[in-house]
Image (tube, rainbow, N blue to C red):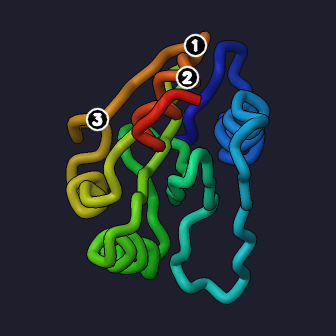
């Protein structure tokens, strides 16, 4: 079952995670990855103050996140090589930020997985970006 906003509108990654995040951080260099090859690469690369990060954007389906088969391997391999990889998921009016190292746990435990950061509407983008980049924006 897809996540719904009040009034029954479905939450989508593009409209309800990517667009508000991008608009909240105009000083961040964003690169949305549209990879039809299916390599598992995360959705967004971001850079600010010399720190790069990858974000996999998700919307909860009930209390679960759905990953493509190649996504967990890409996330874990990038982390193994020192990359900053996060999973940013939305359920209703709440954003959940997870460390990429938690991808397998997320697949098993869903919303019961401990978060690095959680924010409800109105989203605290400044603090979320601080967690992602390790410095204020």
Sequence-earlier tag: 2 or 1? 1
Q: Nearer the viewer, residue 107 or 40?
A: 40
Q: Residues within 10 Å of mark 2 (few under 14, many from 20)?
A: some
What kind of element bears circle 2? helix
What x and y, as percent, mark residue 51?
51, 53
Q: Residue at x 72, y 51 (%)?
A: 29
- Marks 3 and 2, Cα distance to the nearest angstrom? 17 Å
Quadrant of the image for the C terminus?
top right
What x and y, as percent, mark residue 106?
28, 52
What x and y, as percent, mark residue 62?
43, 39
- Marks 3 and 1, Cα distance to the nearest angstrom? 17 Å
Q: Nearer the viewer, residue 58 or 6?
A: 58
Would you place residue 50 above or below residue 74 in this image?
Answer: above
Sequence-earlier tag: 3 or 1? 3
What x and y, as percent, mark residue 6?
65, 14
The image quadrant of residue 117 is top left
Q: Is residue 88 left or right of residue 102?
A: right
The residue carrying mark 3 is: 115
Q: Nearer the viewer, residue 63 or 18?
A: 18
The residue carrying mark 2 is: 126
What kind of element bears circle 3? loop
Q: Which mark is residue 121?
A: 1
Q: Residues within 10 Å of mark 3 (few under 14, many from 20)?
A: some
Q: Residue at x 42, y 59 (%)?
A: 85
Q: Is residue 11 visible?
A: yes
Q: Residues at badges 3 and 2 in contact (C-beta under 8 Å)? A: no
What kind of element bears circle 1? loop
Q: Residue at x 58, y 24 (%)?
A: 125
């Amino acid at each position: 079952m897809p996540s719904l906003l009040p009034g029954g509108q479905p939450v989508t990654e593009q409209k309800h995670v990517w667009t508000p995040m991008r608009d909240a951080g105009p000083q961040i260099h964003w690169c949305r990855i549209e990879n039809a090859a299916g390599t598992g690469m995360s959705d967004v690369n971001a850079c600010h103050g010399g720190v790069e990060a990858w974000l996999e954007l998700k919307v909860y389906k009930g209390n679960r996140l759905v990953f493509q088969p190649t996504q967990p391997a890409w996330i874990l391999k990038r982390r193994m090589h020192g990359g900053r990889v996060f999973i940013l998921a939305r359920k209703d009016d709440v954003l959940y930020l997870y460390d990429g190292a938690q991808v397998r746990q997320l697949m098993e435990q869903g919303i019961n997985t401990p978060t690095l950061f959680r924010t409800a509407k109105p989203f605290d983008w400044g603090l979320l970006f601080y967690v992602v980049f390790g410095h204020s924006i």
